[in-house]
């Protein structure tokens, strides 16, 4: 039987950071609430959670990189909402953000997850922030817990204790 590795949802050791864009705050605050609630319900202590806010989703990658460089966090959850408004701004902001956070995630020690909504309408965004279609902030928090625990297993393998 081959060995198989995947993260579980047990309370992970270490601190979590939430990087949140204030633009479309009525949506991003709901994503934040969903993410914090998920962390707490999975046994992460309230005082192990820090929240960092930036003006908009465009600023999320640079904030996330700097938060990751502190070395203080095992998990970083990024939260934002880009809503199409009939201008090309949407594509630039959404594209830069996804690319930038992907680059940070690739190079970071911490597990970095993506809770950024890209929606055509306000209604779609609200639905994905806890109304009809779940809460993307909660999903990103859950993925982060799983990845932190998987990183823990990989660290034990690296030390020859796996
Ligand atoms: N920022 C968002 O987070 N969501 C948006 O929908 C959005 N739109 O559409 O303009 C948005 N723009 C602001 C941007 O993220 C920067 O904060 C701004 O351009 C300053 O750099």
Image (cartoon, rainbow, N blue to C red):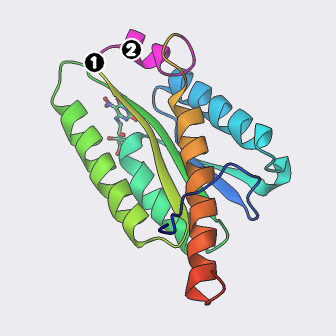
Residue located beneath label 2 in the image: 124
Could you tell me which residue is drawn at 69 percent across and 36 percent down?
A: 38
Asked if the residue at label 1 sits under 8 Å from ligand 1, the reply is no
Q: Which residue is mark 1?
A: 120
Q: CA distance from mark 1 to mark 2?
A: 7 Å
Residue 155 rendering spot, x and y as whole percentages: 60, 79
Q: Is the residue under label 2 in contact with that under label 1 (CB below 8 Å)?
A: yes
Question: Label 2 crowding class (10 Å Cα cut-off): few <14, some 14-19, many 20+?
Answer: some
Q: Residue furthest left?
A: 88
Which residue: 62% across, 89% down?
159
Quadrant location, ligand no. 1: top left
44, above or below 68, in the image: above
Q: Position of residue 18 (x, y in %)?
A: 61, 48
Front residue (pair 162, 69)? 162
Is 125 within the magenta?
A: yes
Q: Nearer the viewer, residue 3 or 14?
A: 3
Q: Secondary structure at mark 2?
A: helix
Relative to 22, is 108 above or below? below
Chain part drawn in magenta: 120-131
Mark 1 surroundings: few (<14), some (14-19) or many (≥20) residues within 10 A: some
Residue drawn 32% across the image and 14% down it: 121
């Amino acid at each position: 039987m081959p060995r198989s590795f995947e993260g579980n949802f047990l309370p992970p050791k270490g601190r979590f950071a939430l990087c949140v864009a204030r633009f479309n705050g009525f949506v991003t605050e709901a994503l934040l609430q969903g993410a914090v609630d998920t962390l707490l319900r999975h046994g992460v202590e309230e005082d192990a959670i820090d929240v960092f806010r930036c003006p908009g989703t465009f600023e999320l990658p640079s904030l996330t990189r700097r938060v990751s460089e502190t070395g203080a966090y095992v998990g970083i959850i990024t939260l934002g909402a880009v809503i199409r408004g009939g201008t090309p701004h949407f594509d630039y902001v959404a594209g830069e953000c996804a690319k930038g956070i992907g680059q940070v995630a690739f190079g970071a020690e911490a597990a970095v997850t993506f809770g950024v909504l890209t929606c055509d309408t306000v209604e779609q965004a609200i639905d994905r922030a806890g109304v009809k279609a779940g809460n993307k902030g909660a999903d990103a928090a859950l993925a982060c817990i799983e990845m932190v625990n998987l990183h823990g297993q990989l660290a034990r393998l690296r030390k020859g204790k796996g």
